[in-house]
Image (cartoon, rainbow, N blue to C red):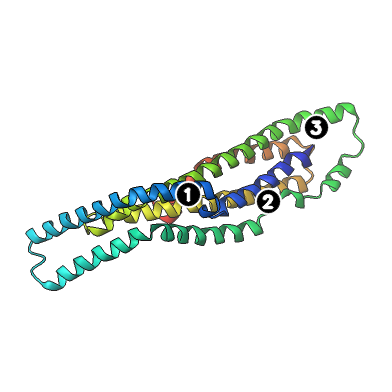
Amino acid sequence: MLKDTFGSFDSAIEKAIQLVTVAPADKSEMWNFTTAAYNVILPVAMTLAVLYFFVDFLNKSVMLEYMRWENVVKALFKLVVCKAILSNVQELTTGIFKIVSSLTTSLGNTAIVTNQIDYSAIKDSLGNPGFMECMALFVKILPITFLMWLVVKIIILIVYGRMIQIYIYTMFAPIPLANLAGEGFNGTAKNFIRDYAGVCLQGTVIIAAMGLYGAVVKDCLGAGNVTNIDGLGELFLISLVLIFILAKSGDWAKKIIGGH
């Protein structure tokens, strides 16, 4: 029963790594819709960029900051750079995603999975229990089995939610990045880039948490705690902690990046 319980967790790790590292463009239907929406939003973002530029230009003109021609050239150059960035937003977001995905893949390869646990040794330590002993062990393990089922569902739910969030961010990316055209507005663009990197890094945080959980499970089961209520209680508590970490993974990823 233990092997079946934690075997589903191993499958969840493999599926999570696959989902958090798959490039947005690899999901053709979703990417086609994202690109179509992006092409609709891009002209609006270009208009906003020009608007932000003129607002910034007027403010600095009033303050007499554009008395020198070098400042005018600098402002126009900033507008040109902003237009180039807006025209290549998808390449920018995809590049950030690929960098984080490579980190996630490397981390996933080092994760401890529960199929590394010596279940035969655990079985030998139990001896030949009778019917009542088997039922008692079943009752002890049942809460962990339920929690593990819940953990697997939460993992898949969060990973799919993150995937949708990445497509939404890519779709609307031109609007916050249009703020780069105005010096007084570019904080919004910087915050967006940090937030997008945080969403990408959320997958890495999830894989890291699952790897640590696998290590704890291996320690608990390897210590012969299967029949020990304290050992099983520790597994139950660490499973609850994993659920909490999964729920907070997005916030933690943004804090690591430096967002709010």
Residue at the spot 45% in from the left edge and 52% down from the top edge: 198
- Type of residue at label 2? Ala
Residue 175 appears in view: yes
- Identify residue type, mark 1: Asn
Secondary structure type for disc 2: helix
The residue shown at (7%, 58%) is: 62
Q: Which mark is residue 137?
A: 3
Residue occupying image coordinates x 64% and y 47%? 15
Image height of 77 relative to 89, above or below: below
Image coordinates for residue 184, horizontal then vertical, percent: 21, 56
N-term-proximal mark, 2 vs 1: 1
- Residue marked by disc 2: 215
Q: Residues within 10 Å of mark 2 (few under 14, many from 20)?
A: some
Q: CA distance from mark 2 to mark 1?
A: 40 Å
Label 1 element class: helix
| Above-or-below relation of 69 to 58 | below
Q: CA distance from mark 2 to mark 3?
A: 23 Å
**Dots 3 and 1: beta carbons under 8 Å?**
no
The label number, if any, that marks residue 32 in the structure image: 1
